[in-house]
Amino acid sequence: MKKKPVFLYVLLGFSTLGVLMSIYGYVQIPNLIKTWNEILKDEAILQQIGGVDTVKLQLATFEWARSLPSLSMTLLTTALFGISVFFLFVKKDVVKSTYTYLAMRLAVFVSWMVSVLVSNRMAQSIVKNKEALEGVLGANKMTVIGYAVLTILFSAIAYYCLRRYQKAVEEEVLDAEVL
């Protein structure tokens, strides 16, 4: 009986959610831009959410999300996800699937870091209130920490489980040779 790579099923399951959310988010950008432009016209809402700078920063973020570099990273991570799924379910190659998954995790991490750096630059050029700017930059620092922890955690789980999987397969081969 061949050992199943349950770890990879779970990790790719989580990644499926991430990929679908990325695609959905990209498709929804025009609707979000329209909504935030409407908010820009409503003084009462502007007062509640922190003013014009907040809306301008959000609109700039949406424009970045629609840019070629951002779209390229989304397409790259989606392609790596698809390749990992292909190796796992079609080729039945757990090792290649896991390494492709790890490449996808790295691409996602780089994409996140670039987005945070761009967000910091946009905030510094748009947000005039010093306290609000510190809040945005502080939130971005926490985002970096969270992204780093998730990337390290998921990558470590994948690598550790791959090693265990390979050992189990080797033991099966040795047991089969003995019989």
Image (tube, rainbow, N blue to C red):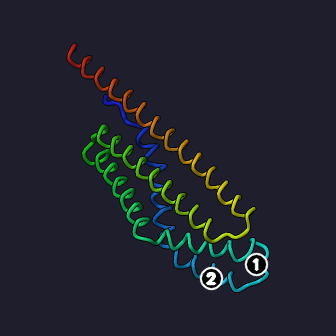
Where residue 45 appears, x then y in whole percent?
Answer: 76, 78
In this rendering, the answer to whether 27 lies above or below 108 is below
Foreground pick, 119 / 9:
119
Q: What is the crowding at mark 2: few (fewer than 14 residues within 10 Å), some, or many (at least 20)? A: some
Where residue 51 appears, x then y in whole percent?
Answer: 74, 75
The mark found on residue 150 in the picture is: none
Residue at (73% x, 64% y) in the render: 130
Amino acid beneath label 1: Ile
Answer with mark 1 or mark 2, whichever residue precedes in sequence: 2
Question: Which corner quadrant holds the C terminus?
Answer: top left
Q: Is residue 135 left or right of residue 26?
A: right
Residue at (49% x, 44% y) in the render: 151
Q: Is residue 4 left or right of residue 154?
A: left
Q: Which residue is mark 2?
A: 37
In this rendering, the answer to whether 51 lies above or below 99 is below
Q: What is the crowding at mark 1: few (fewer than 14 residues within 10 Å), some, or many (at least 20)? A: some
Amino acid beneath label 2: Asn
Residue at (58% x, 61% y) in the render: 120
Foreground pick, 113 / 131:
131
SS category of the residue bearing label 2: helix
- The outermost residue toward the bottom is 41
Foreground pick, 81 / 92:
81
Q: Which residue is mark 1?
A: 45
The reply to whether the C-beta atoms of the residues labelled 1 and 2 are less than 8 Å apart is no
